[in-house]
Every structure is written in C-alpha cells, then in structure tokens.
Image: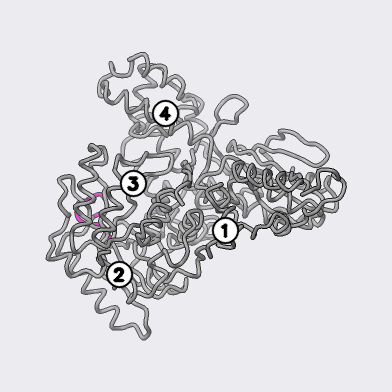
Amino acid sequence: MNNWLAGDGTWPSIVKPNRIGKNELLHPKVTSNRVRAHVNNEQIAQHLETLADLLEFQGANSFRTGAYRNGARRIRQMTDSISTLIGQGVELTSLEGIGKGVSEKCHELVERGKLRQIEEILEVVPASVLDLLQVPRLGPKKAAALFNQLQITNLAELRAACEAGKVRELSGFGAKTEQVLLDGIAIAAAANERILWAKADDLVQELREHFQKCPAIRQIEFAGSYRRGRETVGDLDILVDATDADAVMDHFATFQESAALIGRGPTKMSLRLESGLAIDLRVVPTESFGAALQYFTGSKEHNVVMRQRAKDRGWKLNEWGLFAEDNSEVALAGKSETEIYEQLGLKIIPPELRENRGEIELAEQGNLPALLELDDIRGDLHMHTTATDGAASLEEMVAAARARGLSYIAITDHSQRVSMARGLNAERLLAQWAEIDAFNQQLDDSFVVLKGIECDILENGEMDLPNEVLAKADWVIASVHYGQNQPRQQITDRIIGAIRNPHVSIIAHPTGRLLNRREPYDVDLRAVMEAAVEYGKMLELNASPKRLDLNDVHLIAAREMGIPIVISTDAHSTKGLDAMRYGILQARRAGLTAQHVANSRSWKELHAMIGRQR
C-alpha cells in the first residue's frame, strides 16, 4: 500500500508552558516525602543540565558547566537509582564521573526536589529564556547575547527580532544565522507542546502504580496517541471502569500536589501537571468501556472510517457503543473493542496501525500482519563501550545482552572522526577486535560478539577508516555525524557512496534527526533506498527515543521496497539496551513483522544477507 501518512516527533523541553500564562521551569516538586521516594535519575539529570544551561547563559566557565553536563550524562546511564544510593549512605563521589559539586546537587534534589541555585538564577533571568535553548544551533552563549543586547526572553520575541532583521546586526550572528534561527523556532515551539513517547510511558507507569491503590477501579487503560505508539504525545487520556466515580477522581487529585485542576464533572476530570502536560480522566460504564477505548484511542482518521462503516450498515458508532439507528437504548456492542470490530465485520486492529493507512481493508480481508514483538529480536547491532563514549565495558555489555535473551551483539564504537568521543583509529580498533576474538573463544555457548565499527562518512565522501581495515570487520555501520548542513545532493552522494562500499553493512540513523532538537538533514531518501536495494544493504531503525530514525513512513517505504531493517539501540550503557522496545513500537506502526527485520534472524542467516544484490 502507498497511502500511509507521516507521523511526527518532538523532544521534551525542560521548560514547558503552563498554557494559562507564564512559562515555568519543570521541577518534580510534590510533597517532600513523595520527592524522597520518587525523584529519579532522569529528573536529576534534567535539573543538572538546566543548571549548566543557566550558568553558561550567565557566562560561567566551561569547566564548571561541563562538570554538571558530564554528571547528568553519567547519571542517565546508571542502572542504580541515585535516590536509593543516597538512602543507603553511598558516597556518590566514589562513582565514576560524579564530583563533589554534582554529588551535593544530587543530595539537594533528593531532599527538596529542586535546586536553590536554579531558583536564585531565575530571580534575575526569566525562565522563558530556556525556551530559546530549544532552538537548534542556538546555545547558551548566543542566547545570552540575544538577551543582553536585544532583551529577547522568549520565542515570540526571537521571531519578531529575526523578521525585523535585528539579529543579523549582532556580532557573531549574520543573515544566514538569523534565517537558521527563524527556521528553528518551530522546532522549539513544538518541544513545549509534546513529549517523547518514552517520557509519556514513564508517566503512565507512575500513574498505573498510583491507581493500583484505588479499590474502586475495575479496569483502567490509557488511550490516545500514547496507545497508538506515536513518537510524541501531547496529552494523556485515561479511561476507567469503576464502582465509584467520585472515589476514582478523588484519588486522581492526589497524584501530584503541584498539579492544577482544569475541571471536574460527574464522570470526567482534567489535571495539568507542572510540566504543562494535561491528563484527562474519564469514568465510563462497563458496558461502554470497549467503545470508549476504541473511540479515544483514535486516530481521528481511523474513527471517521469506522463510523462510516457503521452508518453504511444502518448503525451508529460512538464512545458509548454501537447502536442500531432506530434503537439507541440497547447496544449491539460496546463492552470490548473486539466485539466492536467483529460486529463491523473486522478483525480487531492493533492500536499502532489505526491511522487510516489501509488497515481497515486488511482487517476486512483477514490479512492484518502479525506485528513484530520484542521476543522476535535475537541480536543488537549498534552499541558503544568505554573504548569510546560508552559507560560500560565489553564484558558488561555482553552480560547485559545475554540477560535480555539475545544471542549476538556487535560492538560498534565510533571511528576516529568523532574525536569528542575518543573515536578509534585503525590501531586501536584492531586491538579491540583482537580482544573480541579472545573473548569469543572463552564463551562456552553459541553467543557471538561481532567485531564492528560505526564508521563516519567524512565530509568529502570517503570512509573514516581504510578499506583494508573495514574488510576485517564482521559488521560495518556507516553514519553521518558531520557536514549535516551540506546541500541535498552532496549528502545524498556521500551516503550512496558508503552504500557502494563493499565493506559497509548498513546505514545508521539515515536522516540524522533528533526529535525536537534537530531536523533531518536534507537527503534524497528515495535515492538512498534505491541504492540500498541495488547493493543489497540494510537500513537502521535507531531505537533511541530521541532518534527513532527511520520514522514510520520511511519504514513503510523500505518495507515495500524489500529493504531489510535492523532495529538497534545505539546503547551507550547497559541500560541503553532497553531502548529496543521503542524501536519495536515504531516498527509496529509501520506494519513490520519479524520477516521484515533482519536481526530477528540468527547471525548466520543475517550475515548471509549482507551485500546480497537483488
């Protein structure tokens, strides 16, 4: 099918509009006891990064801000909870990458849920200036220049100044930079409206835990774009079947002390979290729960077709059930989603496919795909170790992969061009591969560690390492990290040149996007896919929640062209291996089955596919 539509994607902002007036800094502040119990590593890392941004905005030295950024990165990679470690009396400075300053801030966050230093800075710097930092290629120093010289404090003021030609007059900016900023304002604005699916999922799990303590609840489900697995989520819809609606809503009101009540009625209640995210709770009758779940899951386009299908049969479909037009008292179906779809002559359609992209016709024909599952994945072919910018050793990554039931992995540290990550030159890479060979000989089962590399495609189109070195690899990832602003044809030619290289196995994160942080580079992806078909190469679905690259529409195109997809985590820590499930969700939205995903096969089978021209 060719009528699949585009999804969208955004990256969560530290500053969220409360959609009533001013901007507020995102603090996980609730009651002090709750903070001690629930402040997590991600929240701590966000605060440390915000502090670094504000300090850099004020002109603090790079060593100081770098310490907070490095601490945030290290804390994100940790599997142990900082709150738990502090509660156990562990000295945080004994941990790699955690200095005295970061340790003190962690203790304060666990105790208070916020940082005094951030509060002090925000007494003289408007919190809204952090919105400016969401604009691609506008760092704290340039944002400070805009603030100090043009008194720009928010995105609206930045847009007005760019359109008036005032920004180009500042030293270090110019007309080209002004246009780049103007183009990036939409990305920054979107960051204040939607959050990553992964962030929404963290919140959903917290809400599920919260509602488990409410005995009045019989059933609970989360609907909307979250349930359909879209890359980003604008709000959360909760559906509840309960014996007592008031008891459920009273319990919902205690979720976060800082949450604002938007409205409450007999069966519906809405809260707005301090982050700006709205949560709508609806209590529905048991006999209507399935109909409500189908209706509020959406998408709008899917539901339009469903309602028309009911109308064509002389029925009426809404959130209360499926009814005959002449009898709205007795529902033909409504208790479960399955009976709604079956009554309309359809197999139940997985939520991820409900975008009116042909899924209803497939359901009618009984041809819905058996969508990919996490258990189908047998190997992870993109990850980094302490040899470059990873947080775990080879041995630790192997142990973590085996604990997740994988049968092979590829160690793919960066090549030398990525100097900030201490990328590997030929000598260091060959030494690492010798270490992998020795490690494999020690394994007493069929698990395999592949000798891999993430090799940069240089700005001039050449590979970052000699062919005689790449020829010795089991798995070569080619990727673009630099020169992303080159013209469309130049970037396209670089990637196609890598595809033609006989030693390259796959192109990683093919469009280079970072959700709500960086737009895809200008590449002719159709030409890239045609080259992949011609030379028998694979394309990556990078499962990192900030990338999810390829997107669902691109994956559909790759599927239709017969290009094998490899879902990889790009893990930089053992915890990062868990990102695989985000890639699975993205693949499901594109209708991918295990047949379409190369790393659902054994390494022997996958290896035979590399470079096989079709």
Q: Marks 3 and 2: which is nearer the front?
A: 2
How far across and how far down the image is residue 296, in percent? 67, 45
Q: Which amino acid does label 1 sit on?
A: Gly
Q: Quadrant of residue 476?
A: bottom left
Q: Is mark 4 on a helix, strand or loop?
A: helix
Mark before the other along the chain sequence, 3 or 2? 3
How far across and how far down the image is residue 169, in percent? 28, 16
Q: How crowded is mark 1: few (under 14 residues within 10 Å), some or many (20 or more)?
A: few
Residue 185 bears which disc, if any?
Answer: 4
Extent of the magenta region: 413-422
How far across and how far down the image is residue 126, in percent? 49, 25
Query: Residue, x 28% and y 53% (percent of image)?
Result: 530
For the residues marked 3 and 1, what is the alpha-carbon distance in whole angstroms?
43 Å
Q: Residues within 10 Å of mark 4 (few under 14, many from 20)?
A: many
For the residues marked 3 and 4, what is the alpha-carbon distance in whole angstroms?
20 Å
Q: Which amino acid does label 3 sit on?
A: Thr
Q: What element carries label 2?
A: helix
Disc 1: which residue: 87
Q: Do the residues labelled 3 and 1 touch (CB within 8 Å)?
A: no
Which colour assignment does the render follow?
A: one colour
Confirm whether residue 72 shows in the render. Answer: no
Disc 3: which residue: 511
| Relative to 510, residue 426 above or below | below
Q: Residue 55 in magenta?
A: no
Mark before the other along the chain sequence, 3 or 4? 4
Q: Which amino acid does label 2 sit on?
A: Met
Magenta region's main secondary structure? Answer: loop
| Relative to 577, residue 515 above or below | above
